[in-house]
Image (spheres, rainbow, N blue to C red):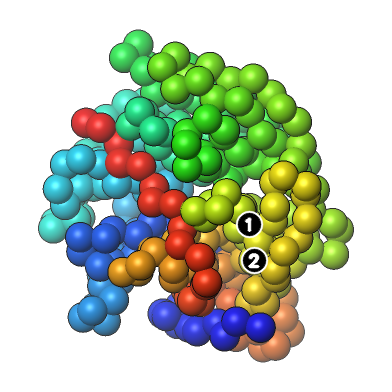
Amino acid sequence: MKKINVLYEGEDMLGEGPLWLADEETVCWVDILKNEVYTYCIVEAQMRSYAYAEPVTLLVESTAKQQLVVAMKGGIGRIDLETGQLTKLKDLEIDKPNSRTNDGGVDSKGRLWVGTMDLHFQEGAGSLYLLTEKGFVPKIEKTTIANGLVWSKDGRTMYFIDSPLKTVKAYRFEGENASLELIGDVVRIPEELGAPDGMAIDEDGMLWIAHYGGYSVGKWNPNNGELLEKISVPAPNVTACCFGGADMRTLFITTARQEMSKKELEEYPLSGSLFCVETDVSGVRKNKLIN
């Protein structure tokens, strides 16, 4: 069993969206319920935090230095990592007061994908959008909690999680026009492992899935749906993971304290912390958003 370490002991209510910045040797993540963004420099062991008026749910690296593009309630913006200043860029679902963004990612062509959801988890109220020159275009509609989104190393397969379905769906992905063709469910999460949340992909094409309510991250084979490995986490609500580190073999893992009783928090006091574990495979680097 791989040894899991506490990288930063915190009390995130809903830690999410980990992102590795290789040039800065820094891992970033968010606490959606506290409206905060965090950066932790591995080399200097230095933590910085930024607070905003709206929940920030997704961080993506852009080609502009020292800037992240973020998804937030009501749209997307840009954060300057030197000052923490957030500049709003585009609106998304501002006509839906109970809507907010959730997870997303950047495809091989440098285009941004953002999922939305209803604050009260209304079934089918969300969508997965692609940002185009004409604005946000829905690509997968009637989702409930748009979550883990990754592409295979060759960019020809997209994997997507709608958490309440407890599955990972695979799509044939055509890069030039961003067209999707559903292949079907390639992973099914059993009841004892909770619900699938955030997701990462490794060089071998295996999917690393955060099990919310399942105390673990699972390494799953999308070719046959088999659970290859389970990394136990000392927190029930495991929310997301990403690969990073000098050789892309460190898995960073976020967790949450929301929905936990006083007794559960006493039993799992590290809930809401950022964890890391060394793996035996390199992860696929996340694509940068082309500005």
Taking the image as shown, residue 169 lies to the left or right of residue 206, namely: right
| Residue at left offset 39%, top offset 33% | 108
Circle 1 sits in a helix, a strand or a loop, which is it? Answer: strand
- How crowded is the residue under tag 2: few (<14 C-alpha within 10 Å), some, or many (20+)? many
Identify which residue is drawn at 70% across, 52% down.
Answer: 221
Packing grade of label 1 (10 A; few <14, some 14-19, many >=20) is many
Q: CA distance from mark 1 to mark 2?
A: 5 Å
| Location of residue 209 in the rendering, given as x and y in whole percent from the top left corner | 63, 57
Provide the residue designation for mark 2: 217
Q: Secondary structure at mark 2?
A: strand
Residue 36: which quarter of the image?
bottom left
- Residue 14: quarter of image: bottom right
The quarter of the image holding the N terminus is bottom right
In this rendering, is residue 201 above or below 289?
A: below
Identify the residue under disc 1. Answer: 209
Q: Earlier in the sequence, mark 1 or mark 2?
A: 1
